[in-house]
Image (cartoon, grey):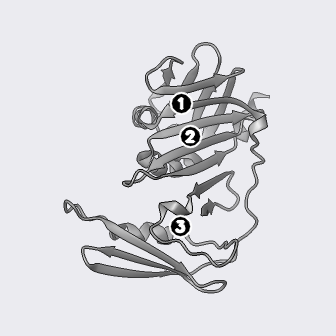
Amino acid sequence: CSLFLNYKRQKFRFSCLCHAEIFQEFAVQEKSVMFWINLSVLDCLTIFGTSSLPGTSTALRMCYRGYGYPLMLFLEEGGVVTVCKINTQEPDELLDFDFCSKNVVNKIILQSEGLREAFAELDMTSEVLQITMSPDKPYFRLSTFGNAGSAHLDYPRDSDLMETFHCNQTQTNRYKISLLKPSTKALALSCKVSIRTDTRGFLSLQYMIRNEDGQICFVEYYCCPDEDIAEAEL
């Protein structure tokens, strides 16, 4: 099962890749089903399934009858069922970042705890997040340039948070924080994150999420470097 969230005219793509085994019940009649929904509607669903009662969990059932029909969500919590109907839209062509493994220059796997701490400590009034990956010092550096000035956070290659470090050349690229923020929700749920860059400086963030039953799914996030910054440096 692949769920794609694409923003029109924005230069990033957010996708969730799940195996059928992660669901208690999974039945898809057609080989591929694709549609768009308004993300602002999903934000409204946060009023459901947020009980703080111990031992209470929320079950979700998703149903879709086909082209032209709404997406049906059934949320059950503590014996109470909420039914949501979300209108679907005609999908445009998916953004293709042509991000191939053979073009990957640098790759690290980091425990998500390290990236969560970075997002909490760095100055998010900055418009961009600068990422430096290098076979030499500083190895892996995150930088912001906000109202309080420049801030840098370095991770040595032998850090306890670093699980894999494969850097072939020094790369420094900047990415708009406004485009990266949607991925922080997946970051909060993940246990590991794979960070890759290709020859063009395109960024791939792959979050590994383990559910309560120990099953694993992945959320992948792609973002292009800030072209305004790159042109200004030419």
Quarter occupied by residue 65: bottom right
Sort mark 2 into few (<14), some (14-19) or many (20+) by Cα contacts within 10 Å: some
Looking at the picture, which amino acid does disc 2 mark? Glu
> In the rendered structure, which disc, 2 or 1, sits on the residue that comes first in sequence?
2
Q: Is residue 66 above or below residue 185?
A: below
Q: Position of residue 9 (x, y in %)?
A: 70, 58
- Contact (CB < 8 A) between labels 2 and 1? yes
Instruction: Measure the alpha-carbon separation of dots 2 and 3.
Output: 23 Å
Q: Nearer the viewer, residue 201 or 75?
A: 75
Q: Nearer the viewer, residue 206 or 137?
A: 206
Quarter occupied by residue 52: bottom left
Looking at the picture, which amino acid does disc 3 mark? Leu
> In the rendered structure, which disc, 1 or 3, sits on the residue that comes first in sequence?
3
Location of mark 2 (residue): 127
Location of mark 3 (residue): 39
| Label 1 residue SS | strand
Location of mark 1 (residue): 145
Q: Residue furthest top?
A: 136
Residue located 47% across and 69% down the image: 42
